[in-house]
């Protein structure tokens, strides 16, 4: 089922039993190393979190990425693929590749510089030949669907939250709903200037939500989503959103990972909301990588 307004979403969640699946976090993670890291001018046309005047230090970005891999390996096994110098946004693989049990899903990227990522035969082969995953290839579709950048998934309940923008249209939302085998997808407009849902919304192991209301075109959409998570909702200010405090991920049932910048932006009351359902906070310095307009969650692909 796909719904497109708060009333229908609230009706849908009220009509079914949404039992939480304890297998709501990934079994492993995959990363793509930054290679000759720089900013993609094409991506900057619709990513307001980028500033082409602030070029990253490639060696510093590489060191940050290595530390990220080391740290999240405390929670799950991690595989790091080599980077492609011609696809500098490849450091954010969750937009191009995603998984559900038994399947690899390849996204349909808006920009040519990112379409190159989806054609990587080595990454495709690792999933399909080594792991035996069925390929669901959306990369040539007549739509835009940037996977778990645009579609934030509550894996515990099988619910997708899809923010429509230049990076995902309604046809792309329908294609992802089918590819991920979701029970329910709620589609809504992101605020002007927002490119991906995962910079305004995070769902943590089905038990908590982090929401930047200012990132939604209609605040009622944000409030409808929040209603499913009760008292375990962290509401972010616009300034915290800019610090990537919604671009976070739970790779285990007991920890939330975010950048150091995001962690520094949180207030004690917000930390307490995360601690209440049992999450500790892990953080990694990603200042150079964040210059490319994404943060920790963008860097992490999940293997289910």
Image (cartoon, grey):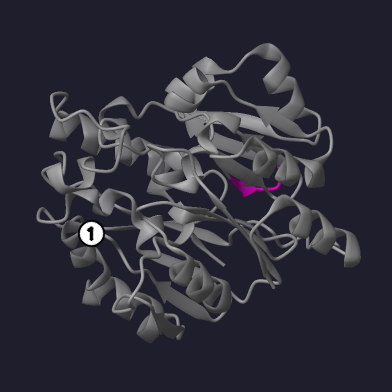
Quarter-of-image position of residue 132 = bottom left
The location of residue 186, given as percent across then percent down, is 64, 59
Q: Is residue 74 above or below residue 265?
A: below
Q: Position of residue 211 (x, y in %)?
A: 62, 35
68 displayed left or right of 66: right
Q: Is residue 79 visible?
A: no
Count all numbered tags in the image, as a single digit: 1
Q: Residue furthest top?
A: 268
Residue depicted at x 22% and y 38%: 62
9 w.r.t. 34: above or below: below
Q: Is residue 233 visible?
A: yes
Mark 1 neighbour class, 10 Å CA radius: few under 14, some 14 to 19, many 20 or more:
many
Magenta residues?
A: 250-254
Which residue appears at 22% of the width and 58% of the height? 111
- 204 in the magenta segment: no
In percent of width and height, residue 33 lies at 25, 50
- Give the main secondary structure, helix, strand or loop, of the magenta stretch: strand
* Residue 251 shown in magenta: yes
Tell me: 156 left or right of 113. right
Compare residues 67 and 300 and report the one nearer the observer: 300
Q: Give the residue at mark 1.
A: 114
Q: Is residue 242 above or below residue 247?
A: above
Q: Quadrant of the N terminus?
A: bottom right
Which residue corresponds to the image point at 84% horizontal and 38% vertical from the top-left?
230
Please state which of residues 79 and 209 is positioned toward the viewer in this rendering.
Answer: 209
Instruction: Give the quadrant of the C terminus.
Output: bottom right
Kindly state the secondary structure of the residue where label 1 is placed: helix
**Left or right of 188 in this view: 154:** right
């Amino acid at each position: 089922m796909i719904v497109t307004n708060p009333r229908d979403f609230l009706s849908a969640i009220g009509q079914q039993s949404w039992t939480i699946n304890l297998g709501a976090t990934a079994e492993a993670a995959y990363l793509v190393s930054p290679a000759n890291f720089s900013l993609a001018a094409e991506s900057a046309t619709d990513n307001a979190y980028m500033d082409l005047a602030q070029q990253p230090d490639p060696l510093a970005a590489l060191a940050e990425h290595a530390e990220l891999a080391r740290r999240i390996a405390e929670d799950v096994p991690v595989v790091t693929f080599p980077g492609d110098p011609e696809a500098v946004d490849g450091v954010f693989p969750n937009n191009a590749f995603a998984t559900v049990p038994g399947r690899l899903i390849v996204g349909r990227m808006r920009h040519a510089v990112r379409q190159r990522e989806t054609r990587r035969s080595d990454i495709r082969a690792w999933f399909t030949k080594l792991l035996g995953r069925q390929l669901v290839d959306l990369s040539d579709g007549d739509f835009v669907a940037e996977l778990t950048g645009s579609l934030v998934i509550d894996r515990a309940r099988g619910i997708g939250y899809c923010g429509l923008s230049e990076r995902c249209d309604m046809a792309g939302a329908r294609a992802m709903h089918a590819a991920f085998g979701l029970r329910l997808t709620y589609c809504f407009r992101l605020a002007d200037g927002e490119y991906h849902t995962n910079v305004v919304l995070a769902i943590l192991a089905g038990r908590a939500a982090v929401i930047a209301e200012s990132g939604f075109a209609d605040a009622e959409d944000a409030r409808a989503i929040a209603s499913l998570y009760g008292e375990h909702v962290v509401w972010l200010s616009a300034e915290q959103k800019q610090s990537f405090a919604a671009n976070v991920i739970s790779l285990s049932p007991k920890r939330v990972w975010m950048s150091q910048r995001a962690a520094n932006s949180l207030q004690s009351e917000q930390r307490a909301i995360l601690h209440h359902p049992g999450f500790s906070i892990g953080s990694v310095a990603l200042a150079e990588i964040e210059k490319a307009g994404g943060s920790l969650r963008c860097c992490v692909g999940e293997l289910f």
